[in-house]
Image: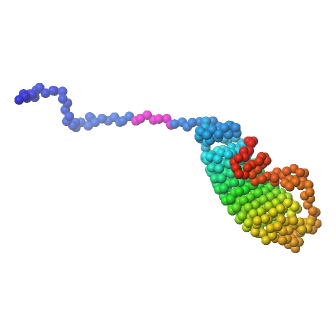
Amino acid sequence: MAPSVPPSSRPSSIPSFSPSSDPSAVPTATPTEPPTMPPTQQPTYPPINSKSDLEAAITTWSSTGSSIYGPIGNWNVSQVNNFYGLFLGNSAFNDDISGWQTSQVTDMSYMFYGARGFNQDLATWDVSRVTTMLGMFHDARAFNQDLATWDVSSVTSTYSMFAYTQAFKQDLATWDVSRVLDMSFMFHNAPGFNQDLATWDVSRVTNMGQMFYNAQAFDKDLSNWDVSRVTTMIEMFFGAQAFNQDLSNWDVSGVFWFRQMFNGASAYNTNLCAWSDKIQTHDMGSMFSGTGCPEQASPSFIAPNLVSPLCNVCSISCCPDHHTNRTTYDVSNRTSNGSTNGTTNDASNRTADKPTDGTAYDASNPTAYVPSNQ
């Protein structure tokens, strides 16, 4: 049996663990707060000062997704005044550039030509200084954004602007187009477009050739348009299968070319004999072929100042305001698509797929044509 340890031999240094009733023994210090970190400073990017720098930046961004100018939506492009062809043929581009500063831009022609995937909001862009939008959305097949608030009052050309835009069907009724001279091909092969354009001031327009060519849904009232300066209506409603509006009060006395104007507009059957004493040209071949007109034969002069048929058989009795003292119009020195001095009319000789510089364009491959940068 082991001997017991006497109490006096226990260690005297063992502390007592009995709870203390002394409040002063409770620690009063608060935990130390972690140091405050300074806010992260946003990187500063340089502005883009020239069109060539902007084009180079777009090329880099499209291939790498990065740029020394930061994210593309935040680029400072306020010093660039020419957007000609920026995304031309860039079929994959679909980034948000709604924040770009565009107030100094004067040229947006061919900007999204062939950008088939692009469909971003541009409603807040200031386009008030832009003078040309020709081909701007040509073959931008996905594009269908609201542009109603754009100030286009400085624009002089909308040639081919929405051609081949398969999806576009937005309201443009409030646009001020009073300075536009060339609307040819504007809605060429835009099958979904059917918006009200009745109040457009087209009094300065000289070319409406192929304006609604194959715009298969379009059937809106244009009866109040002032077309007195228009010289070209070649194939204006060619293949516009739904169109059947009364245009009999149009002043077409300045039009030189009516060829195939309604050809293939299968619903069209409106009597246009009111034009009979206004027409001064022999270029009316196949004007009503493939329409719903009772008389589809090509119009011809049945008297010095009287044309028939114009969708219906016309006679002197149809036209009480016939100008009996009018001189016969001389077309002997006119080229088929030109002016009296033999020079080519500014856009009358274009095909549906030939941009304004006259370079050949392959309709089977709408992005094949690449206009030269300006």
Q: Quadrant of residue 166?
A: bottom right
Q: Whole-percent x and y of residue 175?
A: 71, 56
Where's the C terminus, which quadrant? Answer: top right
What segment carries the magenta color?
33-39
The residue most toward the bottom is 317
In this view, the residue in front, 148 or 302, is 302
The residue most toward the front is 364
Q: By what rule are the colours in the image chosen?
A: rainbow
Q: Is residue 275 left or right of residue 104?
A: right
Whether 214 is among the magenta residues is no
Q: Is residue 77 left or right of residue 210?
A: left
In this view, the residue in front, 44 or 63, is 63
Which residue is at a point 91% across and 60% down the rendered structure image? Answer: 329
Where's the N terminus, which quadrant? Answer: top left
Which residue is at a point 28% across and 36% down the rendered structure image? Answer: 26
Q: Whole-percent x and y of residue 137?
A: 69, 51
Q: Is residue 51 above or below residue 123?
A: above
Q: How many marks can you see?
A: 0
Whether 37 is among the magenta residues is yes
The residue most toward the left is 1
Q: Whole-percent x and y of residue 323?
A: 90, 67
Q: Whole-percent x and y of residue 352?
A: 75, 54
Which secondary structure class fits the magenta region best?
A: loop
Residue 274 visible? The answer is no
Residue 93 visible? The answer is yes
Q: Quadrant of residue 204?
A: bottom right
Q: Is residue 2 above or below residue 174?
A: above
Which residue is at a point 61% across and 40% down the rendered structure image? Answer: 63
Q: Is residue 240 left or right of residue 59?
A: right
Which residue is at a point 72% across and 46% down the rendered structure image? Answer: 369
Q: Is residue 189 above or below residue 249?
A: above
